[in-house]
Amino acid sequence: MSSFGRSQTRKKTKRKMKATAKKMTMMTTKATTDTRSQHGKATITFSRLVDKLQQHYGSPAPPPSTDPLELIIWENIAYLANDKRRAEAFAILKRTIGTRPEQILGARHSALAAIGKAGILPDVSAEKLLTIAKIAYEEFDSDLRAALKKPLPQAKKALKRFPSIGDPGAEKILLFTRSYPVMALDSNGLRVMCRVGYAEEQKSYSATYRLVLNAICGRLPRDYDSLIRAHQLLRQHGQDLCKRSKPRCVECPITDSCNYSRKG
């Protein structure tokens, strides 16, 4: 075979190899896309999800308070404390000092820090309680309810003036105080929603939060009782079974509808 013939043969071989590689890439991409589609879409409706959780756990616990300032205090009273210790600290605060801004501002720092020992960093918790009381007293005349009657963006902005309150926390307070019928999710509930396929977890918590809310916005009930029930049950499930590490999938009442469980 001439050198020209050998050159043409090599070119044909290279073209075939490129075509084969391209075909394999397309097949791999399709398989990956199919897998993502299978594992990235919710296979259970929001209402069915909440109903199954209630069948498993029973009626959820009510919110710790319906007062906006007390809900802000609840979030800050004991850093990284579980619900039981947080509730104990909150009860001590109400009994020994009170939850009105004037009462907290008149308390000794040491007394507030002693209550904050229910969690870690008690001195930081004490400072946060004093900051909360100061903002409520100076900016809201000790009454947040008037601020929550404003249009939704303004009501959320008012709540976000306080320590540890971002969009999720503000929306939870608006829901628990029955100011706006918005769906709120804490980190536990958000994890459950991602695992059943309503969104993929993003690097940004706020981005994940918004993706999930956008995915369920047209499927939500509009009454307060149903929204609060959903929040509490999703939170409980994330705490009890659908944990971040070592989730107890064998005991899960929604494992058949869970993308995370199928991947495992």
Image: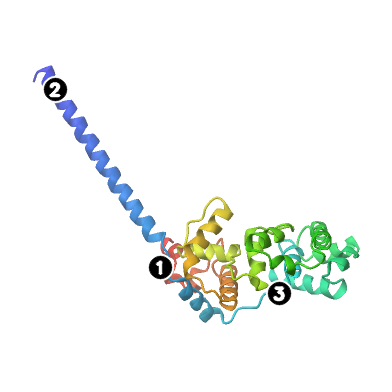
* Residue type, numbered disc 2: Arg
Q: Which residue is mark 2?
A: 6
Q: Which residue is mark 3?
A: 66
263 up-or-down from 1: above or below: below
Q: Give the image location of residue 257, x and y in percent.
A: 42, 69
Identify which residue, 241 or 123, lies in the foreground. 123
Q: Give the image location of residue 202, x and y in percent.
A: 52, 52
Which image quarter: residue 151?
bottom right
Precedes in sequence: disc 2 or disc 3: 2
Q: Dividing the image into 4 quarters, which one contains the N terminus?
A: top left
* Residue type, numbered disc 3: Thr
* Residue type, numbered disc 1: Thr
Identify which residue, 38 or 141, lies in the foreground. 141
Residue at image location 47% in from the left, 71% down from the top = 46
Identify which residue, 256 or 182, lies in the foreground. 182
Disc 1 vs disc 3: which is toward the camera? 3
